[in-house]
Image: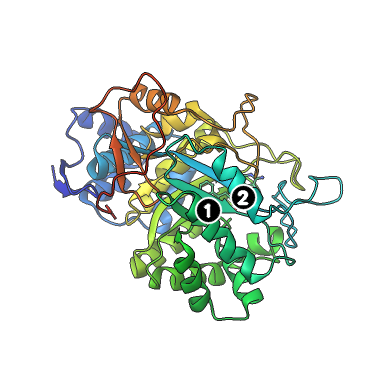
Amino acid sequence: MERMIESPEGRVVQGAGMNGTEPLMERYIERAGLAEVWEKVRAGERLTFEDGVRLYESHEATAIGWMANQVRERLHGDVTYFVRNQHINYTNICNKDCKFCSFYAHKGGPTPYELDIEAVRQRVREHADFPITEIHMVGGINPRLPYQYYLDLVAAVKEERPGAIVKAFTMIELQQIARVAKKPLEEVLRDLMECGLGALPGGGAEVLTPRVHEELYNKKLDWRDWLATARVAHSMGLKSNATMLYGHIETLPERVEHLLRLRELQDETGGFLAFIPLAFDPQNTKLAHVARSTGVDDLKTISIARLLLDNFPHIKAFWMMITPPVAQLGLRYGANDLDGTIMNYEITHVIDRSNRQALTLEQLLELVREAGRVPVERDGLYNVVHRWDVEALPAAPSPAAAPVSLPVLN
Ligand code: V47
């Protein structure tokens, strides 16, 4: 059965099974014991918790990836988003002691730092010649920072980069800001939005189950409070992302539980833009003995997210965590976004020994095109900045320019 479906880009795209591979793949999927799941995916029916666990327990990554790719193509065709963005981590001082974290300052770990507003401005100015359209800013829970610091931080970045979306503060940071402000969360969000806050990143969700919370990050928000904070932000019109930190102590059913909790909130608010699976990097953490996730697990996690999160428009293959080659493959396993140039990432270190902290526009375009996809540059809210299938790459790096304002797609 073929279906015509409206994509988030507002285009009508062909339904599953239009590329001629369906009969072959269906036989393979049946042999893999996933026929029932495929029937539902094909019919656009919602998958259950049991379906999610069955997918995770299957070793047939190619079958799972193919199904996820059908859904990805239904929604987005070949369109693959990326963003020219910059990450800024304003402090690594944190009182939460999460066992999976190597970023926060502690004895024998990184030296503590706290960027003052001028230093943050300077970071933004370092890339003044580059047309960045998203500034992603997060930091540790640093009890020394007063309310005014956060307001000044957002206002300063917005002033330096008026054309960019300031995507800042995870749910736990927002709760900390409300605590130091001694104001209700709604009021704090309103103040931050007035200063220029445009969206929220997806961090801090970790694995939204009581056991993982208790064992790894019990000083941070638990699943109920993380979701409750996101609910308030969404109700005020702020879009956010959601992540899952996988590949440590969590079980496969716990991953599914996490995804379904996100799906339930998305049904209620529609406020999530993208889901980003974050592969755990054990180096220099209290879980240094844990083996790093494999390429198969990274790809399956992208695919299963695409299949279970039927109400999330975007699934991101975050190249920094899984390496550019695996992220590129992810574009055929359900992902429709690669994140972006990043510029500098301090939470973890890139895992392919290249010590890479950034990708150039040319590298991103090549990754996308080589995967047979169409690169579309977006801003932090998925407004289209430029379709790179219609114009050749300029010979010299493009000059700094504010993106033209195009309609919000989601
Ligand atoms: O919340 C911490 C994770 C997150 C480690 O919204 C670790 O577009 C791996 O949320 N190994 C911050 N991950 C990063 C984040 C993010 C990244 C990219 C895009 C977006 C988005 C959001 O990093 C933290 C935590 O879950 N993290 N330690 C680690 N050792």
Residue at far right of view: 107
Where does the image place residue 342, in percent across and percent down from the top left? Answer: 52, 38
Give the residue pinned by disc 2: 120
Q: Residue at x 50, y 33 (%)?
A: 296
Give yes or no for contact between labels 2 and 1 (Cβ–Cβ under 8 Å): yes
Q: Is residue 23 visible?
A: yes
Q: Position of residue 401 (x, y in %)?
A: 37, 39
* Residue occupying the point 49% across, 59% down: 257
Between 174 and 38, the one lying in front of the other is 174
How far, Cα to Cα, is label 2 from label 1? 7 Å
Q: Residue at x 50, y 50 (%)?
A: 160
Question: Could you say where residue 77 lies in the image, as x and y percent from the top left?
Answer: 24, 37
Q: Amino acid at mark 2?
A: Val
Nearer the observer, 164 or 184: 164
Q: Point out the tag, 2 or 1, that comes first from the N-terminus.
A: 2
Mark 2 and ligand 1: say if the CB distance to the nearest ligand atom is below 8 Å: no
- Give amino acid for label 1: Val
Dot 1 crowding, Cα within 10 Å, few <14, some 14–19, many 20+: many
The answer to whether residue 254 is above or below residue 35 is below
